[in-house]
Structure formats: structure tokens, C-alpha cells
Amino acid sequence: MQKLIRPCHVVSILLMYVVQMTATADEPKEVPAAISRIQEQVTADAKKRLEPLSTIDDQQPQAIGKYSSRGDAQMFLADFKAAVGDYQSMVRLDPATDTSHWRLGIALFFAGQPKEAAAQFDKYHAFDNVDRENGIWRFLSHYRAYGPEQARKELLKYEKDDRPPFPEVYRLFDGSMTPEQVLKSIPEDLSDAQKNSRLFYSHLYIGMLQVVEGKDAEAKQSLAKAIENPWPREAGFGPNYMWHVARLQYFELK
């Protein structure tokens, strides 16, 4: 005997369909082919860079530089604890490197040690009280360690000018600008390099804020734009390192 479908059952089925479609829409898409190729290439490069650094003699004059190079390679391969160890070895051999060692702070953040990371960024602030990028990482570390209210309460205040786009990006973290406003604040009449520089840092740190806020799908979109930006890989040490940070965080979300 054929069963009748009651109206309440129809409503339930429709609700289940809507929930399923919404969940599917929110799920992160597959990794774009271009980013997959980049990931394969940089992984191969980092492994090659690591090969001659399997053993380091602390007594050799090049030891600090080798720990630095090996720490970077470990970091780029997402072996965060090993990167922390190598960066700390640099400090052990030369304590003067501690206060300016922002890479150690970032490695600690990725290694799941946000309190230690925050302490490292406090040291860096004593070394350079202009660099708002350090204040951003301190905020991200405090967010992970103590929660959003404490992080915003202890957000560092800066009085001196910083390089663009950090004055605007920092306002994202103090809550006085939205991601859309940060991006719209980038002038149109810039050279390609200047514009790409500002877009890179804006997308990177919009993405990092979305990460700690648990907005993974939005974070992946922001970080993907940072990864696909050509400027940081051509700009030198610091920007290139931060490009790797965008890449690492993107794949951590997977």
C-alpha cells in the first residue's frame, strides 16, 4: 500500500536539502592547480636545501648561518618544531640575535606555542617599536593563547609611521577598518610592484585574522591571493619568507 507524504515531511526534506547545500557551499574548494605546482616546487627546493645541512658543527664560524638556513628549510617544509630548534640554536650560539629574531616567533606560532611566540614578539618590540607587522603577530599569538578580548586589550599602540600598507592593515586588527576598507585604501596610481606589495600584505594579514577567527573558507581565499601574488618571491628575504608563511598557513587549513 503506497504511503502518503505528509506536508511536514516535505518541509523536513527541504530543510535537509538546504542545510546540505549550504554546508557544501562553505566547504573549501580543491587546491588550485597553480598552487599545487608551486607547493611541489618549493617542497623540492627546501628538501634540496636541507640535504647538506644534516649535521652542523657548533665550533665552526659558519654555524649560526647554517642553523639559520636549516631553520628556514625546516620551516618551509612545515616541520615547525625542528625550525624552532634551529632558530633557538642560533640564539644559543649568539644571544644577541634573540631580540630581533622574528622568524623564531613565527615558528613558535606555527608550532602551537602561542604564549612563547607572544613573548618573542615582545622582545622584538623592544628592538623595533615602529614595525606594526610585529604587533600583528603579537596579536595573533595572544588571540591563540588568551582569546580575542585579551588580544585586543593588549594590542600594541604605535606612534611613529610605518611602511605601507601596515598603518591601514593594523587598523584591521584594532577593529577600525574592515577587510574591504583595507583593500580599497590601496591607491590606484601605483606602479605594479608597489600595488602588488600592498595587496600581498593586505591579503596575507586579512587571511591570518580570518584564520584565528575560525573563518577557514574565507581565510583560504585570502591566502590563495597572497600566494598567487608574484611580488613577494621577487622582493627579497623578508617578503619571500612571508610568502612562505601564506603558503604554509593555506595548507595548514587543509
Image (spheres, rainbow, N blue to C red):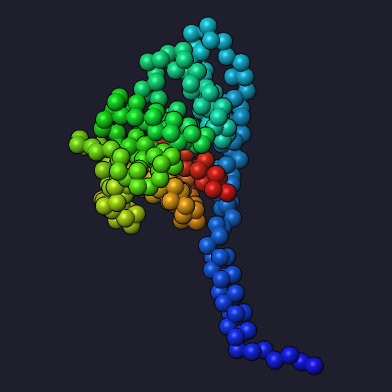
Residue 138 drawn above or below residue 253: above
Q: Residue furthest top?
A: 59
Q: Position of residue 96 (x, y in %)?
A: 37, 15
Tell me: 35 left or right of 143.
Answer: right
Residue 176 drawn above or below residue 49: below
Q: Residue at x 39, y 39 (%)?
A: 142
Q: Position of residue 47 (x, y in %)?
A: 61, 29
Q: Position of residue 58 (x, y in %)?
A: 53, 10
Q: Residue furthest left?
A: 159
Q: Is residue 160 visible?
A: yes
Q: Residue at x 40, y 25 (%)?
A: 101
Q: Residue furthest right?
A: 1
Q: Is residue 65 visible?
A: no
Q: Residue at x 56, y 65 (%)?
A: 23
Instruction: State the image quarter where residue 1 is shown.
Output: bottom right
Instruction: State the image quarter where residue 117 is shown.
Output: top left
Q: Residue at x 48, y 32 (%)?
A: 108
Residue 83 drawn above or below residue 216: above
Circle count: 0
In front here: 172 or 31? 172
Q: Position of residue 231 (x, y in %)?
A: 41, 41
Tell me: 232 left or right of 170.
Answer: right
In front here: 41 or 151? 151
Instruction: State the image quarter where residue 115 is shown.
Output: top left
